[in-house]
Image (cartoon, rainbow, N blue to C red):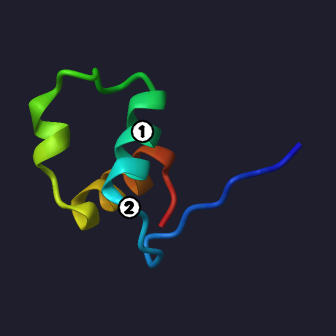
Amino acid sequence: MAVEYYSRNQNYSKEFLVQKLLSLDIYKVGDKQLYELTARELNDEFSRQMNIG
């Protein structure tokens, strides 16, 4: 089984991060705030949700 590791120092695309955050079922597809965040903010939010840093 593969384990995915995420780092705050890596640059993921906004689309990738949005899809990962949506997959956590915390956000919904229509959540406008999610799409207004920058890639850096999305990465920080994803790291926070995954409790990594």
Q: Which residue is mark 2?
A: 13
- Extreme residue toward the right, this view: 1
Residue 5 higher or lower than 1, as above or below: below
Image coordinates of residue 27 in percent, x first then y, are 30, 26
Are there few (<14), some (14-19), or many (20+) residues within 10 Å of tag 2? few
Residue 51 higher or lower than 30, as above or below: below
Q: Nearer the viewer, residue 52 or 42?
A: 42
Numbered circle sitting on residue 4: none
Q: Describe the element under mark 1 as helix, strand or loop.
A: helix
Residue ID at (50%, 47%): 50
Q: Describe the element under mark 2 as helix, strand or loop.
A: loop
- Extreme residue toward the bottom, this view: 9
Q: Which residue is mark 1?
A: 19
Q: Disc 2 residue type? A: Ser
Q: Earlier in the sequence, mark 2 or mark 1?
A: 2
Are there few (<14), some (14-19), or many (20+) residues within 10 Å of tag 1? few
Q: Disc 1 residue type? A: Gln
Residue ID at (42%, 38%): 19
Image coordinates of residue 9 in percent, x first then y, are 45, 78
Image coordinates of residue 41 in percent, x first then y, are 23, 60
Q: CA distance from mark 2 to mark 1?
A: 10 Å
Image coordinates of residue 29 in percent, x first then y, are 27, 23
User: Is residue 52 left or right of 31 when viewed as pictured?
Assistant: right
In the figure, residue 22 lies in which quadrant?
top left
